[in-house]
Amino acid sequence: MTEPNPSITCQVAVVGGGMVGAALAAGLARRGFRVALVERRAPQREWPADEVDLRVSALTRASQRLLQNLDAWPRMVARRVSPYRAMEVWDATGSGRIRFDAADIGEPDLGHIVENRVTRLALWEQIEADGEVEFLCPDAVSALRPGDAHPVLELESGARVDAELVVGAEGADSPLRRMAGIESSGWAYDQHAIVATIWPERHHGETARQRFMPTGPLALLPIDDGRCSIVWSTSPEQAERLMALDDDGFCAALTGASERVLGRIRRVGPRAVFPLRLRNADRYVKPGLALVGDAAHGIHPLAGQGVNLGFLDAAELIDVLTAARQAGRPLGSLNTLRRYERARRSADMEMLALMDLFKRLFSNELPPLRLLRNLGLRLADASGPFKGLLVRRAMGLTGELPSLVRYRPAR
């Protein structure tokens, strides 16, 4: 890490060095942009080999390709990535059930469950190995002075960053988004999510499972050694009760909630809980500024799409900025940045709306809706081509995709 200089000039300043911000910085640097990365905390470098982070992501094939093209994937595999080759989804209030299998579409797996800290560290290590990004860490933005041509960041260290474009990638509570005066729309769900690592009686068989209950979905995400990471979304009141239980009581409650699909839950690790909400920034861009990842949008975790959307944001912005440079357009102009906003805001809103619909459909106990969703699951499960289309879309294998998730760019 280098100590921040009093004044830094770059083409793109990325604020936030989490998974999405680090991927953006790495990708831009590989396209020949001068990049500065501002981050308050460096990633955790070491942890016990048998410890699983509470925060994991279900990375799609599109995200895997992006990470492979940035040469971060081998570093991740060396630590731990857990493939899942099947997925089962069922309704707790009926007989509706659907199963997806990678073999049915000729793929080795449907995706990977990966600890967030593994992905972030691998990206940082690759950026350090490439040596093309200027790290400003530990540091944070204290003020944003916008400008069409060259916005200026003032950092808490006293350093000043002059850039053609500033990108906010600091997460859901993005200070940069607030400094830019960009509002966000959305609502809080009547749900909290409990996350933990569990030891089930039976091996998960490399299958991701999700049971939809009226209070919210329970996801059982496979870890390569037979453990599972759980995301249990439920009412705030039930979440409080579950968090107050001792480990034996929680395991008993989880065994019942999972319908013993993996037998008895024998052990649980540390638990954490966080509230769920839907949120989308009213704008993704302003002159000299763009938002990516959770700084731009927040989604219900029931399909694990949050970081995958963020990686697609980063990949799209890289393509837009590369095209602007080739055409001689200013990187921070609205003419440039609206191309990114048009491409990603509509796609993100489509996914946010779809996940919100699923949440409301499966948490509604009205008999007609219960019959409709169970019938829909059964019909979808019986429809081979349609089911294949669904899973390929979820994996990021269809539609127009940014270049970084489609092929290995030339170095």
Image (cartoon, rainbow, N blue to C red):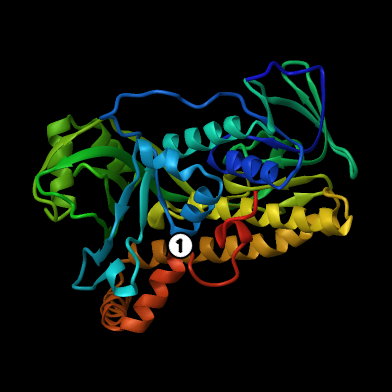
- Residue 313 is left or right of residue 246, and the answer is right
Relative image position of residue 121 (x, y in whole percent): 48, 32
Q: Which residue is mark 1?
A: 355
Identify whether 127 is placed above or below 280. Answer: above
Residue 139 falls in image quadrant: top right
Name the one closer to the observer, 299 or 381. Answer: 381
Q: Amino acid at mark 1?
A: Met
At x 57%, y 60%, the residue is: 407
- Residue 76 is left or right of residue 409, and the answer is left
Identify whether 178 is placed above or below 379. Answer: above
- Residue 74 is left or right of residue 30, and the answer is left
Residue 76 falls in image quadrant: top left
Name the one closer to the observer, 225 or 245. Answer: 225
Q: Is residue 358 visible?
A: yes
Q: Secondary structure at mark 1?
A: helix
At x 40%, y 58%, the residue is: 303
At x 78%, y 19%, the residue is: 159
Relative image position of residue 306 (x, y in whole percent): 49, 51
Residue 391 falls in image quadrant: bottom left
Relative image position of residue 243 (x, y in whole percent): 27, 34
Q: How many numbered marks appear?
A: 1
Identify whether 344 is placed above or below 131. Answer: below
